[in-house]
Image: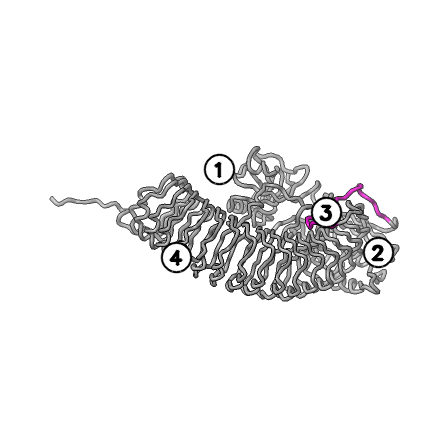
């Protein structure tokens, strides 16, 4: 009688890919080794401590992902997988790579980040097909001297290591597009760095550089350059010869001036130059016609050039903590300006032309020496936040009209004016790291009514200026996994300390421009009479025009009662992956308890001892932003998706005191 055999179905079918990620595996399952033609194996986020030798008999394997495990050794048999094109060993405990890696000639993507490597074998550079090499957060003190042999390399990431020098052969990587050397111990860059003609992104922040090579101007394709947190005193004079540069970060250095070629950066959109030693801002800045964000805080600037008014696309200007005594009248030409922050200077007046900045939503002049504000502040109908004091708790300010007897023109004032300088008589010489508390409002509120017959805004139109909801937008680089360790601190950043890269406001009410009683063209005609004569600012306004301007503000709805403060809270998930918070509300759901009908998302419970509790999150906090996602008009599902994306969650919340939301038993994972 003939014998019959029953073949398992699994043996009869072709299996190309297996995904056993997040399966709580302690070892590689034996059934995987049956699939001899397996090409893609995903074992990420398990508890695997060693690689079974049978794995290396899968000679057709092209993609192997064993990241987020507990591997301590990479066997020499890895060289048997000659068809490998992607190998991910990220987040293990591997201290050494075997020389047999050189046999993986087809390898294009190699991720070795977050392993305790101290060196890489020189033979790794024989894998000349590699295009992406990730070496972030290891213990490397040196890169292979022949790294220039990786002629197809397009991305090299070596952030957060112990590198003191860079091999000279790195300049031979002519196809390199992204180079990240941030958070190392570099004191100099190769003099011929300009040979990297394909380079588009270059991050060398948090090092010990004192200068940049002149040849860097040869990187003509460079789009993003970050050299922040170094010890650079001067920038190369030919820096402007990089026509594609759009994002330049030179913050936290010792730079004393910007090069004269700066005006050639026609595509520059963002310049971060805060916390340096700038005494003057070159007039060439006005030629950077594409500039939208300009950060100059904590320098030694005594004035701004008139050419600042040529920046017609500028939306954010931050000149906090300088020595500015006035602002040029040309600021009124910056029609796109939405955020103007001038706190902690020595300003005694604002130009009347401020009224031409018709899109201004945030005006911060806290801790200056202003006796009053120009009358034209009243035509800033989009203004939602007006900061006059470090201790100001609300943005709702009832402004009163009065008259400047010295100039004979109308101005506006309130109980926070005139301002009192907290360090009157003290100089500012020394480090550019200015004391952020120096301008705190002292002496209590002060009432300033020169003319009791003048009517207030409330008596005219019952108009009030309201604060909308802040949204913080993070700097888009370095991208994951390039987050700097220093930023994961679990502390709150109050409004007074640092300004975000971009600050936008979303109002909870609808504003009708027709309620102003006249068109913007009419307002511009009024402002056209504002001019400077003989060096003294004057405003020639007829009584009729003054009356029209007095009625040009619309009545905005009152903000909910209670003090409101914006906080940024960074939370590192615990070992279980949980944050320890619950929230309610959001679109498509009933409003959170005691939220006064607000449809936003509110924190309703913070588990004592949890990660969220330790980082300062409170019940009643309203979610404004979660990581990079706007939480205004968001649903609970939107919030959950945004929070799950990263191990470190950054929440921007609006905090009211007392808390409007009570405890609730509804919980979220």
Which mark sits nearer the N-terminus, 3 or 4? 4
- Side of 578 where 434 appears, left or right: right
Which mark sits nearer the N-terminus, 4 or 1? 4
Q: Nearer the viewer, mark 3 or mark 4?
A: 4
Residue on which the image places disc 4: 126
Residue on which the image places disc 1: 576
Q: Could you tell me which secondary element the residue under label 4 belongs to?
A: helix
Please provide percent x and percent y for residue 458. 79, 49
529 above or below 109?
A: below
Residue on which the image places disc 3: 395
Q: CA distance from mark 4 to mark 1?
A: 41 Å
Which mark sits nearer the N-terminus, 2 or 1? 2
560 above or below 309?
A: above
Q: Nearer the viewer, mark 4 or mark 2?
A: 4
Mark 4 crowdedness (10 Å alpha carbons): few <14, some 14-19, many ≥20: some
Which mark sits nearer the N-terminus, 4 or 2? 4
Magenta-drawn stretch, dominant element (helix, strand or loop): loop
Asked whether 615 or 607 is in front, the reply is 615
Residue on which the image places disc 2: 410
Name the residue rendered at 38%, 39% in the picture: 26
Q: Could you tell me which secondary element the residue under label 2 belongs to?
A: strand
């Amino acid at each position: 009688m003939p014998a019959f055999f029953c073949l398992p179905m699994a043996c009869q079918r072709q299996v190309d890919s297996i995904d056993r990620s997040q399966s709580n595996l302690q070892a590689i399952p034996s059934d995987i080794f049956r699939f001899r033609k397996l090409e893609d194996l995903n074992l990420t986020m398990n508890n695997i401590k060693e690689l079974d030798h049978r794995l290396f008999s899968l000679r057709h394997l092209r993609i192997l992902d064993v990241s987020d495990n507990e591997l301590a050794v990479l066997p020499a048999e890895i060289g048997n997988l000659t068809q490998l094109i992607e190998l991910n060993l990220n987040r293990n405990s591997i201290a050494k790579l075997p020389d047999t890696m050189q046999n993986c000639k087809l390898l294009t993507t190699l991720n070795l980040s977050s392993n305790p490597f101290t060196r890489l074998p020189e033979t790794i550079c024989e894998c000349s097909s590699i295009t992406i090499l990730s070496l972030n957060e290891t213990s490397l003190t040196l890169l292979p001297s022949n790294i220039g042999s990786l002629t197809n390399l397009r991305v090299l990431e070596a952030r957060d290591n112990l590198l003191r020098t860079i091999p000279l052969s790195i300049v031979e990587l002519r196809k390199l597009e992204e180079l990240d050397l941030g958070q190392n111990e570099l004191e100099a860059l190769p003099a011929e760095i300009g040979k990297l003609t394909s380079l588009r992104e270059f991050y060398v922040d948090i090092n010990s550089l004192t200068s940049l090579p002149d040849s860097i101007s040869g990187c003509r394709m460079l789009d993003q350059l970050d050299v922040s947190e170094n010890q650079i005193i001067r920038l190369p004079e030919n820096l402007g010869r990089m026509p594609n540069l759009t994002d330049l970060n030179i913050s936290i250095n010792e730079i004393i001036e910007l090069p004269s070629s700066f005006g050639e950066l026609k595509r520059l959109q963002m310049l971060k130059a805060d916390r340096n030693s700038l005494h003057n801002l070159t007039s060439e800045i006005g030629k950077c016609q594409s500039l939208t964000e300009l950060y100059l805080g904590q320098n030694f600037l005594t004035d701004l050039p008139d050419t600042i008014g040529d920046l017609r696309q500028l939306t954010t200007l931050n000149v906090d903590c300088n020595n500015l005594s006035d602002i040029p009248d040309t600021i009124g030409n910056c029609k796109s300006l939405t955020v103007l922050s001038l706190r902690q200077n020595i300003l005694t007046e604002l130009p009347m032309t401020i009224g031409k900045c018709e899109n201004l939503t945030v005006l911060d002049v806290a801790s200056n020496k202003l006796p009053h504000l120009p009358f034209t502040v009243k035509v800033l109908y989009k203004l939602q936040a007006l900061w006059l004091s470090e201790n100001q708790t609300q943005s709702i300010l009832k402004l009163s009209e009065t008259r400047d007897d010295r100039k004979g023109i109308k101005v506006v004032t309130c109980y926070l004016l005139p301002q009192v300088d907290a360090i009157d008589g003290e100089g500012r010489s020394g480090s550019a790291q200015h004391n952020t508390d120096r301008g705190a409002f002292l002496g209590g509120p002060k009432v300033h009514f020169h003319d009791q017959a003048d009517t207030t805004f409330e008596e005219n139109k019952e108009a009030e200026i309201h604060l909308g909801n802040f949204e913080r937008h993070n700097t888009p680089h370095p991208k994951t996994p390039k987050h700097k360790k220093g930023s994961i601190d679990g502390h709150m950043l109050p409004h007074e300390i640092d300004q975000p890269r971009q600050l936008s406001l979303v109002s909870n009410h609808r504003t009708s421009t027709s309620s102003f009683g006249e068109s913007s063209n009419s307002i511009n005609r009024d402002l056209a009479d504002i001019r400077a004569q003989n060096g003294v600012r004057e405003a020639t306004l007829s009584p009729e025009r003054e009356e029209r301007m007095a009625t040009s503000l619309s009545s905005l709805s009152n903000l909910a009662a209670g003090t409101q403060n914006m906080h940024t809270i960074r939370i590192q998930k615990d070992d279980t992956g949980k944050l320890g918070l619950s929230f309610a509300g959001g679109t498509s759901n009933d409003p959170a308890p005691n939220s006064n009908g607000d449809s936003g998302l509110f924190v309703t419970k913070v588990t004592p001892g949890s990660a969220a509790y330790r980082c300062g999150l409170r019940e009643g906090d309203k979610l404004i932003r979660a990581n990079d996602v706007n939480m205004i008009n968001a649903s609970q599902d939107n919030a959950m998706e945004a929070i799950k994306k990263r191990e470190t969650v950054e929440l921007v919340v609006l905090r009211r005191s007392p808390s409007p939301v009570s405890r609730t038993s509804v919980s979220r994972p």
